[in-house]
Amino acid sequence: VYVDGFEEFTLTSTTTYAGGDQTYPYYIGMLGNGYPSYYWNGELDEVSVFETELLSSDVTAIYNGGVPTSLTSYSPAGWWRMGDDSSDTASANGSISTITDSSGNGNDATQSDTTSQPTFKALAQSTTSLSFDGSGDFFTTNNTVLNFYNTGGSISAWIKPSSVTGTGTDPYKNRSIINKGNVYLSLNVDESGYPALYFYDGTVREVVATTQ
């Protein structure tokens, strides 16, 4: 796991995963189908998934001193810029139903329900991000985006959580950034606000990397 361009923690998993049902789409801002109350609370930008493991030098370049930069040379399988793509229409405090997949692979993130559409916020570097309310905002993509169980890969995102507090035995509540259905590799933050990576194959759930 890298934070602000620096490697924070490495953990090697010895678990064998079944792969599960990969017909589910990716969810951005919610912990997959079947977990309707587990929403991200905070801002997201430049969410992306890759078919390969990013090198340390790649992560440093992507972080770019704290200013989002183009990911084109890294060939992302999905890249959702939260309003910065020229095909998106961003307006201050406005919402949006479709976020263009800037990877060119056609995996746009959509939300037809106006009550579940995140709202735009401006960042200091004059780009846009989207604010997710923690109670109902999320996007879905189609189910053709990268299947991590078969190929491995990487996830990248710019995050600013507003709340990282779980509820009772629900450690993921308000903290899911992106995952694939309810059989998933999920990028979350833990109860202390640290980025954490989880695998779940329908039977086994494992924290495979965390900065805690």
Image (cartoon, helix red, strand yellow):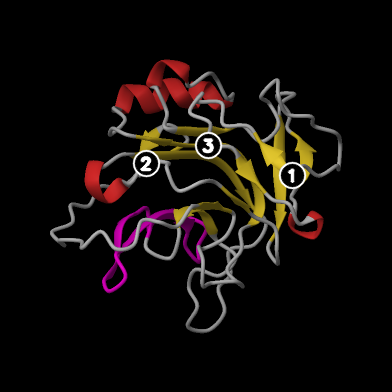
| Residue type, label 1 | Ser
Which residues are the magenta region?
184-212
Residue 191 % position (x, y): 50, 66
Give the farthest residue toward the bottom.
Answer: 168
Determine the residue positioned at 56% across, 70% down: 173
Q: Which mark is residue 107?
A: 3
Provide the secondary structure element on which disc 1 rests. loop
> Residue at horizontal 45%, vertical 60%?
181
**Disc 2 target residue:** 146
What element does badge 2 sit on? loop
The tag earlier along the polypeptide, 2 or 3, is: 3
- The residues bearing labels 3 and 1 have C-alpha atoms spaced at a distance of 14 Å
Give the number of the disc on residue 97: 1
Tell me where residue 124 appears, x and y as whole percent.
73, 29
| Disc 1 residue crowd, few under 14, some 14–19, many 20+, Cα 10 Å | some
The quadrant in which the C terminus is found is bottom left
**172, above or below 11, in the image:** below
